[in-house]
Amino acid sequence: MSDLEKYFTGDEEKWLPVLKDYQRNIVNDFLKNSGSYNEAAEKWISSSPDQTVPFGSSPNRINKEQYFEKFMEELEKFICGDERYEEERKKIVSKANLTETTIVSFVSSALAPYVGSAGPFLVPVVVLAFMTITKMSKNAWCEARKENREN
């Protein structure tokens, strides 16, 4: 089991307490009206367009669905072992008493510059993605992402 993999075991709802109350309330509403954690994450991103910066130079260059997919690509790189995030992964697993809050905060901050967003805005999306990863297992999620890219 890899260093990060051990955090993606158990009950996926263990990630929800990371959220502030107002975020958790919104996320829970999204979950009630969604078919999946990913749908709820997409709703979070699309309901807050002022908090994101489009990829590239043109505001019309990327839509909200593409933005979510770009976010997921970066998260995949972080979680599944891409070289770009090697130093960040080493830093996070070297911390003593690592909690879900620390992991989510660290990953949100690490991804923010690559997706053109503020780290705090990404926290609910990271939580929802981590819920999916925990439900499936890290390895299954990474393989599913790889298969989706290939198809």
Image (cartoon, rainbow, N blue to C red):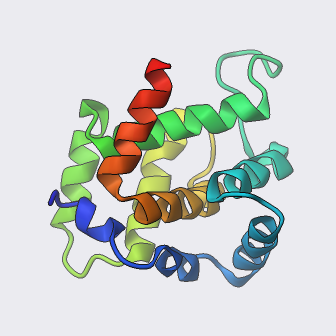
Q: Is residue 53 above or below residue 19?
A: above
Q: Is residue 115 above or below residue 3?
A: above
Q: Quadrant of the N terminus?
A: bottom left
| Residue at point 65%, 38% (across, down) | 68
Q: Position of residue 33 (x, y in %)?
A: 83, 64
| Residue at point 62%, 50% (across, down) | 118
| Residue at point 20%, 63% (across, down) | 93
Is 137 displayed left or right of 34 in the figure? left
All told, the count of numbered labels is 0
Q: Position of residue 72 (x, y in %)?
A: 53, 40
Is 44 displayed left or right of 81 in the figure? right
Is 71 displayed left or right of 28 in the figure? left
Q: Position of residue 77 (x, y in %)?
A: 37, 37
- Nearer to us in this view, 151 or 84: 151
- Nearer to us in this view, 17 or 145: 145
| Residue at point 65%, 17% (across, down) | 56
